[in-house]
Amino acid sequence: MNWGTAGAINRAPTTRAINCQKSVIHRVDQEPEQVLRQSHQSSPLTSLDAFVLIRRGEEISKDSPLLSKINPAECLEHPGEGPWHPVLRGGVDVRPYSIPVAQCQIPYRAIKKPLERYLAPKILVVKSVGRLQAALDLREHVVLQTLYMLRLRHNRPQLGQVPSIEEALDDLPDAHRDEDDLYFLLALLNSRLLQQYVYILHTAYKWVQPQIEQYVLMRLPIPTIATVTQKDQIVQRARLLMGACHELGPVVELKAQSEEYEEQERAICALYTAVLEGKQPALPIEVKSK
């Protein structure tokens, strides 16, 4: 796996993956909007905004004087300006699958939007780029306007169908289910398939300053036909990739992780292909334990 300077993952897709991408992009683009907004129980493909609330961060620039590069320990030496909160900047602190690490702090007085909005677990999507880049924030960072925040809706559709009583979700605590849903959506948003979907249909023509509009995110097609087992495999693989990308830093050249990513791509592609063909997706390749 190779990370470019802009934080995008450069990969050489297989012919099968390319054909899958083209098929999904063409077929989903032809679907009328009402198909993506069917009742959650009957639709195998639902728009992203049915699962998450999408908001932007603080309306200040990444070079604003309101931000300070003091470390958390130094924040204690400036109590009059605080309390301080770590803040993330789009295009600087967020890379696909990596754990976001703040390089700046922002004083509470400069935060204009409800602080509670930032404290919940959330997926972050970089706004001013031509391709999807998503990361998962579990550390209560404040974010700037160059990032979209995706927080789970309480009344969202179920991600992962239940084929038998043994796999019933009632035994899963809400917190565990929420975290699994976040990792599942993180995997889809970082998939080559949805990256190409957004690029080809929405951002390729924006040569001067490409950016992903909020309405584009809201209407991204999300498959809901995965079994609990299939969803769990995608979630486990997302966790492995997130841990590996964080440990190895911005430049990753590791064959094993590249294989895991390709397995993830095949599993995600199988879900979308099954939606288009009206079939149950094949069982994804088993996740390798570390």
Image: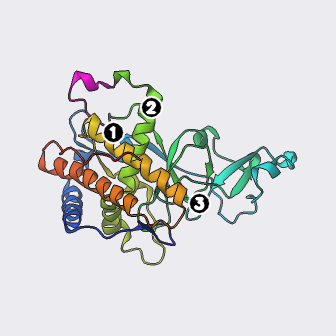
Residue type indicated by callout 2: His
Residue at coordinates 79% horizontally, 49% vertically from top-left?
A: 73
Where is residue 23? Give x, y as percent: 18, 61
Residue 153 visible to the viewer = no
Residue type indicated by callout 1: Asp
What element does badge 3 sit on?
loop
Q: Residue beneath label 2, please?
A: 176
**Residues at discs 1 and 3 in contact (Cβ within 8 Å):** no
Occupied quadrant, residue 1: bottom left
Q: Residue beneath label 1, please?
A: 232
- Image vertical order of residue 19 relative to residue 111, above or below: below
Residue type indicated by callout 3: Asp
Q: Residue beneath label 3, please?
A: 93
The stretch of residues the image draws in magenta is 158-169
Residue at coordinates 42% horizontally, 78% vertically from top-left?
A: 207
Q: Few, some or many C-alpha atoms within 10 Å of disc 1 (few <14, some 14-19, many ≥20)?
A: some
What element does badge 1 sit on?
helix
Work out whether mark 2 precedes mark 3 in sequence or the reverse, and give the earlier one. 3
Nearer the observer: mark 1 or 3; the answer is 1
Q: Nearer the viewer, residue 208 or 129?
A: 129
Real-space Cα distance between discs 2 and 3? 26 Å
Q: Main secondary structure of the magenta part?
A: loop
Where is residue 201? Give x, y as percent: 31, 66
Work out whether mark 2 precedes mark 1 in sequence or the reverse, and give the earlier one. 2
